[in-house]
Image (cartoon, helix red, strand yellow):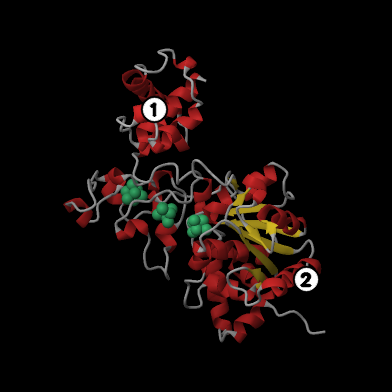
């Protein structure tokens, strides 16, 4: 029986010289935020590692996460790592289809039981018995339950798998849930979990977690949202190339004013960089070509929970009130909701908001749909609706 190929053999086969191995080890050591003293050890361990089996399940997703990953052209770190792992099942990239694909998945699961890595992108719909998304006639939850049982660990890729993403945005019609939520609810096996959020995430973030697993047989240090600290430890703001303009208080006020043309800070256009943890400003996309802020667009906060409902161009204060719940900002938002209620709602609804008839969680939908004639003239924006809801929830 032939011995499994090592990463060293793989690199030689790819045409890399032995001299470039040390360079790769050094780049990985810095990427994993380890001390330079660790370079020889990291290089040695990486070169000796053998190909792990990976099963990749795609659920309610847009394929953006896979697209992002396949956008690396030259032998970058993530390219080399991804080329090396044994991707035994991936809906988009596998050549096999139908029964052959399912047989490959079951075969890999049997052969590497307790050792394979499970990667998930997309959220998992729990509504309507899971009927919103099925694969080979089985619900996403059923498939995930089966695959998580024998997995050594799970990597949730993209904000959909990590937090529910766009499908879980209000009103979440499919009952979309994240991998972590399913674990918490004990609907799937409890396994070591890493979240790699972003819409989509940086390819290097995925590659570095896999590399760490290859080298040390465990995941890197994580933050409280289970994200690798080496990538998500700092905010976009801390590493942004427009930061000096922020400090000089030079802000673009609109997308086409002079400030925008001069590349000033995008804070006043709703940039969420100060509260968003990600390394886009360092690694960027398309072989380090660019990232949203560099191209003139504010950060939308795509690697933080609830970024769809947070409102792309809302002021940071409102965003913080909803997503980070700082006492002061939340109280201000509730107070604005109270004023709105007293100015607009009390003419038809009880003056005492405790006696308000509709569940606060349903108010936004009722008003946004505009199908109640009496509400048609009420032109409330997203922010006002959210404040109103917050106020009524605070009464509850
Ligand atoms: Fe698509 Fe974004 Fe979800 Fe990835 S995280 S599947 S890019 S919507
Ligand atoms: Fe911070 Fe955004 Fe301004 Fe960059 S553009 S400095 S991330 S607020
Ligand atoms: Fe996402 Fe903001 Fe980076 S929107 S891609 S975290 S700059």
Q: Where is residue 116 in the image (x, y as percent from the top left)?
A: 73, 64
The residue located at (72%, 46%) in the rendering is 187
122 or 266, which lies in front? 122
The residue located at (30%, 53%) in the rendering is 242
For marks 1 and 2 on the same chain, the one whose residue lies earlier in the sequence: 2
The N terminus - image quarter? bottom right
Q: Position of residue 360 (x, y in %)?
A: 49, 27
Describe the element under mark 1 as helix, strand or loop: helix
Describe the element under mark 2 as helix, strand or loop: helix
In the rendered image, the residue lying farthest to the left is 258
In the rendered image, the residue lying farthest to the top is 352
Q: Residue 107 carries which label?
A: 2
As displayed, is residue 125 above or below residue 96?
Answer: above
Circle 1/circle 2 CB separation < 8 Å: no
Please state if 76 lies on the left or on the right of 342 as rendered.
right
Q: Position of residue 275 (x, y in %)?
A: 43, 43
Q: Is residue 221 visible?
A: no
As displayed, is residue 3 above or below residue 158?
Answer: below
The residue singled out by tag 1 in the image is 333
The residue located at (61%, 66%) in the rendering is 211
In the rendered image, the residue lying farthest to the front is 373
Q: Position of residue 14 (x, y in %)?
A: 58, 84
The residue located at (42%, 65%) in the rendering is 285
Please state if 131 lies on the left or on the right of 205 as rendered.
right
The CA span between labels 1 and 2 is 54 Å
110 or 274, which lies in front? 110
Q: Is residue 40 visible?
A: yes
**Within-10-Å neighbours for mark 2: few <14, some 14–19, many 20+:** few
Can you tell me whether the CB of the residue at mark 1 lies under 8 Å from the nearest atom of ligand 2? Answer: no
Q: Of the residues tagged 1 and 2, which is closer to the observer? A: 2
């Amino acid at each position: 029986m032939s011995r499994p190929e090592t990463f060293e053999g793989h690199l030689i086969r790819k045409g890399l010289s032995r001299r470039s191995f040390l360079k790769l080890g050094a780049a990985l050591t810095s990427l994993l935020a380890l001390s330079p003293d660790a370079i020889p050890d990291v290089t040695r361990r990486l070169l000796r590692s053998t190909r792990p089996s990976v099963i990749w399940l795609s659920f309610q997703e847009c394929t953006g996460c896979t697209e992002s990953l396949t956008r690396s052209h030259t032998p970058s770190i993530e390219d080399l790592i991804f080329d090396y792992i044994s991707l035994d099942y991936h809906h988009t990239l596998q050549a096999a289809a139908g029964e052959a694909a399912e047989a490959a998945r079951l075969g890999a699961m049997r052969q590497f039981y307790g050792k394979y890595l499970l990667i998930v992108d997309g959220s998992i719909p729990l509504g309507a018995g899971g009927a919103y998304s099925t694969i080979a006639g089985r619900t996403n939850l059923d498939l995930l339950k089966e695959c998580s049982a024998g997995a050594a660990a799970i990597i949730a890729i993209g904000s959909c798998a990590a937090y529910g993403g766009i499908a879980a945005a209000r009103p979440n019609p499919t009952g979309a849930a994240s991998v972590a939520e399913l674990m918490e609810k004990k609907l799937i096996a409890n396994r070591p979990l890493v979240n790699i959020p972003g819409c989509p995430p940086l390819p290097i973030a995925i590659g570095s977690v896999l590399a760490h697993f290859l080298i040390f047989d465990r995941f890197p240090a994580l933050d409280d949202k289970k994200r690798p600290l080496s990538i998500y430890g700092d905010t976009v703001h801390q590493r942004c190339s427009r930061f000096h303009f922020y400090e000089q208080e030079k802000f673009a006020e609109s997308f086409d004013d002079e400030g925008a043309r001069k590349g000033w800070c995008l804070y006043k256009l709703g940039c969420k960089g100060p509260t968003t943890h990600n390394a886009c400003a360092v690694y960027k996309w398309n072989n380090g070509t660019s990232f949203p802020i560099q191209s003139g667009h504010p950060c939308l906060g795509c690697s933080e929970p609830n970024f769809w409902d947070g409102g792309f161009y809302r002021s940071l204060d409102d965003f913080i009130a909803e997503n980070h719940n700082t006492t002061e900002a939340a109280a201000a938002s509730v107070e604005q909701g109270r004023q709105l209620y007293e100015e607009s709602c009390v003419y038809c609804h009880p003056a005492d908001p405790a006696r308000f008839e509709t569940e606060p969680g349903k108010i936004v939908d009722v008003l946004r749909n505009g199908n109640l004639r009496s509400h048609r003239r009420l032109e409330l924006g997203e922010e006002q609706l959210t404040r109103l809801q917050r106020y009524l929830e605070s009464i509850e």
